[in-house]
Image: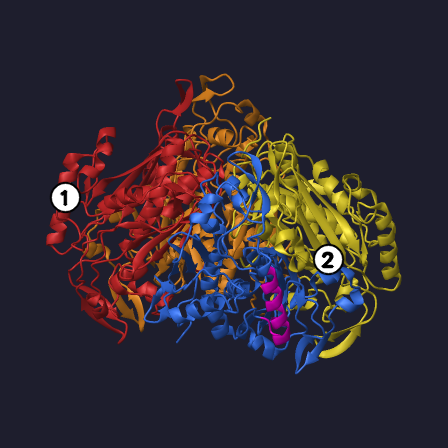
Chain colours: A blue, B yellow, C red, D orange
Amino acid sequence: MLGGNVFGKNFVLVSFGESHGKCIGAVVDGCPAGLELSEEDVQRELDRRRPGGGGISTSRVEMDKVEILSGVFDGYTTGAPICMIVWNTDVDSSVYYEIKDKPRPGHADYTARVRYGGFNDFRGGGRFSGRVTVSLVMGGAVAKKVLEEVLGVRVEAYTIKIGGVSAPEVSDEGIAERYGNPVRCPDPDAAARMVKVIEKARSQGDSVGGVVECRVTGLPPGVGNPIFNSLEGDLSKALFSIPAVKAVEFGSGVKAADMWGSSHNDPFRLEDGKVVTESNNAGGILGGISTGMPIKCRVTFKPTPSISKPQKTVDLSRMEEVFIRVKGRHDPCIVPRAVPVVEAVVSMVLVDHAITLGLIPPVLRR
Amino acid sequence: MLGGNVFGKNFVLVSFGESHGKCIGAVVDGCPAGLELSEEDVQRELDRRRPGGGGISTSRVEMDKVEILSGVFDGYTTGAPICMIVWNTDVDSSVYYEIKDKPRPGHADYTARVRYGGFNDFRGGGRFSGRVTVSLVMGGAVAKKVLEEVLGVRVEAYTIKIGGVSAPEVSDEGIAERYGNPVRCPDPDAAARMVKVIEKARSQGDSVGGVVECRVTGLPPGVGNPIFNSLEGDLSKALFSIPAVKAVEFGSGVKAADMWGSSHNDPFRLEDGKVVTESNNAGGILGGISTGMPIKCRVTFKPTPSISKPQKTVDLSRMEEVFIRVKGRHDPCIVPRAVPVVEAVVSMVLVDHAITLGLIPPVLRR
Amino acid sequence: MLGGNVFGKNFVLVSFGESHGKCIGAVVDGCPAGLELSEEDVQRELDRRRPGGGGISTSRVEMDKVEILSGVFDGYTTGAPICMIVWNTDVDSSVYYEIKDKPRPGHADYTARVRYGGFNDFRGGGRFSGRVTVSLVMGGAVAKKVLEEVLGVRVEAYTIKIGGVSAPEVSDEGIAERYGNPVRCPDPDAAARMVKVIEKARSQGDSVGGVVECRVTGLPPGVGNPIFNSLEGDLSKALFSIPAVKAVEFGSGVKAADMWGSSHNDPFRLEDGKVVTESNNAGGILGGISTGMPIKCRVTFKPTPSISKPQKTVDLSRMEEVFIRVKGRHDPCIVPRAVPVVEAVVSMVLVDHAITLGLIPPVLRR
Amino acid sequence: MLGGNVFGKNFVLVSFGESHGKCIGAVVDGCPAGLELSEEDVQRELDRRRPGGGGISTSRVEMDKVEILSGVFDGYTTGAPICMIVWNTDVDSSVYYEIKDKPRPGHADYTARVRYGGFNDFRGGGRFSGRVTVSLVMGGAVAKKVLEEVLGVRVEAYTIKIGGVSAPEVSDEGIAERYGNPVRCPDPDAAARMVKVIEKARSQGDSVGGVVECRVTGLPPGVGNPIFNSLEGDLSKALFSIPAVKAVEFGSGVKAADMWGSSHNDPFRLEDGKVVTESNNAGGILGGISTGMPIKCRVTFKPTPSISKPQKTVDLSRMEEVFIRVKGRHDPCIVPRAVPVVEAVVSMVLVDHAITLGLIPPVLRR
């Protein structure tokens, strides 16, 4: 598809809008009828995407209030496409005109210019801004509600690494409280250290990367349509739509390369008459199909490319090498704000698969 | 899609066939007309997927001779769908009937049984066998030829790690000779050590995993359709269709989590009047669009799940825990044979994108 | 797809909004970058969809002013998704609450209720209202402009029959002036008689059907991707998305059933060194691919189902047979207002095909 | 999609093979697991496509024996893609080399040459031969069985007009016996007259067209996903993939243009506590969704373009006008052989919709 802004087969998300345009929007097509849905449901997820405080985020004031334009009637989804909008406010585009011809290293400025022949809206990065993830979160809010209400599936993402600081083994309690600290890490001690490293990077005009893990519980075994619509395939495609993602791993992930089969294979056993595995190197997926164990994936984010340190680039209008300093208001680490985005895209993929397999009916009865 | 065996938008691959069925087949729909194509072109790629010798592979004798059934006339593609078949031979299904109810740990036996209600062809793993990658290689052979002839793009994969043994920085010469050693590693010394670790694993009835890297050169900047049809998204989805893949990384990959923006960002500079980057942490992709630098991705494979050591599982017919020994003929490391498969799926994704952007016309003139 | 509100492969239209909801909206994804596009361009097409005067239309005052929310920057398309909105005004939903449980014959009230479990927005017919064609016209306005500017293709629809009154053979001049009369018929005499028959139907609380013909000129030969993405297949699918369509014909259409091969076959001959056909029973398409002759299709519309005469139906809340009179404001003939809608959907299909074949590049250079 | 040989969303048909190539093939992806399926099930439908005797058909001896290559194990579908092949025999391509540069009027010779740059396999019309419908019938055989066994839906097509001879109102008995006469007409008297008109055309080196009607019974109300995946939209797209189709109508069809709303609207009433309509001008579909009444569509076929009378065309190698006589073996009327093809494509569309709505589960339990 030439456009590339439509995702999914049976549960479809369409994303539109630019960072400094009128709005960021999403259309969800294929949501079952009969889901109780309000703007509050979507707002709750959007709020989790807002800066978590602690002085580690952008100073751009993004209220990000959602307005539902269609597809909901009398408090329930109608089965018609659901259009949701967040109107942009507090936009200051002036700095972008200055660097219009000077692509910021690590950003999509250069590639977008080539791909769209210079017609792309470069203000604030346009479609390549982290703001576009607002559309993912809006679509994900609907998906998440369907998953929880119909199947009892929970999708929970959390930060496990930032700037070299790792969280130890995470607990259920820690996960439940993940949105209680600004970095969305289940471990309060690690969270405090992560905040420190972010502050350090910011103070130096620099930025740091990190890792978000996502855990899905409650998904029955047998979900997935290999070979091309495997859970890993569809999830990874969705996860790589989030800006700044450099790696996606399932279960053992990159560690699998150093393991031997006898320790990597997860032995099957019975637990309360149910088939489970003793370990979960599979990350809850075998052959592209869910095992019934928790799905586990990890997503690596690169350090925010917008840094205030001077950087070398090329002035494309004169074709000469220059140095730039990126002004504007940026997060020195986007990992914390990516947490609800990861939950959103994972939720959408799972709803799509569940509808395809008839696990979620086209009408949810009251 | 309930089926999941159709991949691509404009250049489409359909995969069919089972490990112990009559054949493995592929249909390519959307190949431009006018490509000179013979069975030899496809066979060359299939031969690269065959065991590389050195006693490190399965003893199943797979001749894997391709037959083109349609879509080629007088030596050129016609624009019609190209069906390619490899007829299965040397099939021995007896061992699979013994373990029919005892899912092998690390395999899709259990999940396939749940997903398909026990109707799946379990012989040799059926659709979940590594043999299914024959269809990927056949489709990829066509894609690779289109890419090379029309755009001069080269897609080269090679092994960089097996069983804990890593290749040092690889050279162009090494890459050119990669198929000259049984593990398809560009570094002969590392290759020799990788062979040793595989032999060790095999002698212990065990298996090892590893990493394949893929490098794409010659792709112009501006290819990719974000946000959902980003190069990373489409490539990762394709790569996860290969059995045993646990992680996909681009450029800096998982290392990005520990880096700071100032060292991760790739500065732009001019080289012979062309915009290039000094480093390539981006892996040749920014914002889902090619930069013109080489695309670099890494794919982690888990150790072959089929090992002869006894393993714990559940007899599903009696619902009781049992031990099994997996017989049959298996590769103690699938990494070497995955190398041409990685090239195949990467090639197909790139052709699809190139057609979408009009870089490859529907008819290649003689 | 469970949703069904996404159309196209490379040029994609997403439709959302309800008759009595906040708005009718469209997202176009895949429009090439660099098309000069303003709200006026879209408004011009929307205005053609407004009642043509002459007292033959609904009294609902629909200003239908388009607002472009995204995808256009500095007067040019950016390659990003284009969201367009028409905010609903002058909505009076009261009559619909009265007949909520009494499905109007000929309307989708009953089938929508079954399909969406009663959750559908029934006010004004919701998604099943003719108002939804506003989204088609908005998407079509963009497509039409691309077709004309890049390929010089003209898509012109016009009324050839209403309520039994047929237009004679139409002239180029008549077609050029089609929007000059309220029924959009190229023949002024026939137009006058058509107006009369509509007035007669209205005065009797009844309605009439008719036929719209569409002619496409300037399309080069060789466009179409059989067998399933034939021009006829894709055009018919698009045309049947317009409410009230009962038949779609190409070229000779239903008359072909009574013809003999020797008179139906269009002989090829040379004209100015170009291959043309002497007749055009093919309707400009052979084997699903354009011949270079004008594409001709005809679309039959049923009489507006909303009539004020009493009609028999079933009260679904009590499951008993009742009579209803449909109040509300309705067109006694929807054919005239369908004319620009036919142009819109035909244009979108052709742009999609032209992009797929590389006839329209992803960036239109200034 | 550049290829165009893939149809469907959840139940997918892939068609491949050429008239004079090695085979005609079909891959069905998305068929539920657990359907009892044998080659006989498919053969039965293929046999209905064979000439019906009576000397009114081609003399090409097409045995059309199906071979299932994948997707069926132990007599049941596995959920894996089902590849079916009919090997071509009795091929005589010599006459096609003679007319290679002289496109036959009414055929796709010219458009295919332009579209595929002359690389298309022109022998026997290649992909544009009626033989390609073998792939539709194979896919339809699977779909038909799913529909009947899971939902009790019956899809029955029959000839209602040939060469100007119409069948009167058809009876259930007549439909049940439709394959008992060579023209597949439910009315024996009309059938006899249709045979005569075909014989007359053949004796004059000419051909005739006709109309196939299709009736679907047993489909519950509520099936269809408007606006773009309406039943009419998806059915018409599928029907236009059959060569020689010029028109598709639903219910009242083209007659709707002359009707008034009061007589076109189908009043709702109760029958045995069920909502039905008194008439069925809707053709069983309102708003793109099934009403529960029989679906009725009509498909007009043009006269076979291959006639032995001399015809004017252009020699494309010399660019001069010439006359040709089409030799080869052709049906003077393709309508009778199109009857099972219509059933096939209608069945595939309905299964696809039924899967999407969860009416057909991914596994059919024994």
Of residue D181 and residue B358, the one placed in the foreground of this image is B358
Instruction: Tell me, yes or no, if residue D167 can be seen here.
Output: no
Instruction: Tell me, yes or no, if residue B103 can be seen here.
Output: yes
In the visual, does A227 lie left or right of D236?
Answer: right
Chain that bears disc 1: C
Residue at x 47% of width, y 36% of height? C361
Q: Disc 2 designates what residue?
A: B301
Of residue C308 and residue D265, the one placed in the foreground of this image is C308
Magenta segment's dominant SS is: helix
- Say above or below: B240 vs B270: below
Query: Alpha carbon of mark 1 to alpha carbon of mark 2: how far?
Result: 72 Å
Q: Check if residue A196 falls in the magenta segment.
A: yes
Residue at x 36% of width, y 59% of height? D289
Image: magenta residue range: A185-201
In the visual, does D5 lie left or right of D177?
Answer: right
Give the percent coordinates (x, y) of residue D245.
Answer: 41, 41
In the visual, does C228 lie left or right of C132?
Answer: right
Toward which corner of the image does residue B259 lie, by quadrant? bottom right
- Given the current orientation, which residue lies at the most extreme bottom position? A272
- Given the current orientation, which residue lies at the most extreme front position? A203
Residue at x 70% of width, y 47% of height? B214
Label 1 neighbour load within 10 Å: few <14, some 14-19, many 20+: many
Residue C195 bears which disc, if any?
1
Of residue D365 and residue A187, the one placed in the foreground of this image is A187
Give the percent coordinates (x, y) of residue C207.
Answer: 18, 52
Q: Amino acid at mark 1?
A: Val
Q: Secondary structure at mark 1?
A: helix
Label 2 neighbour load within 10 Å: few <14, some 14-19, many 20+: many
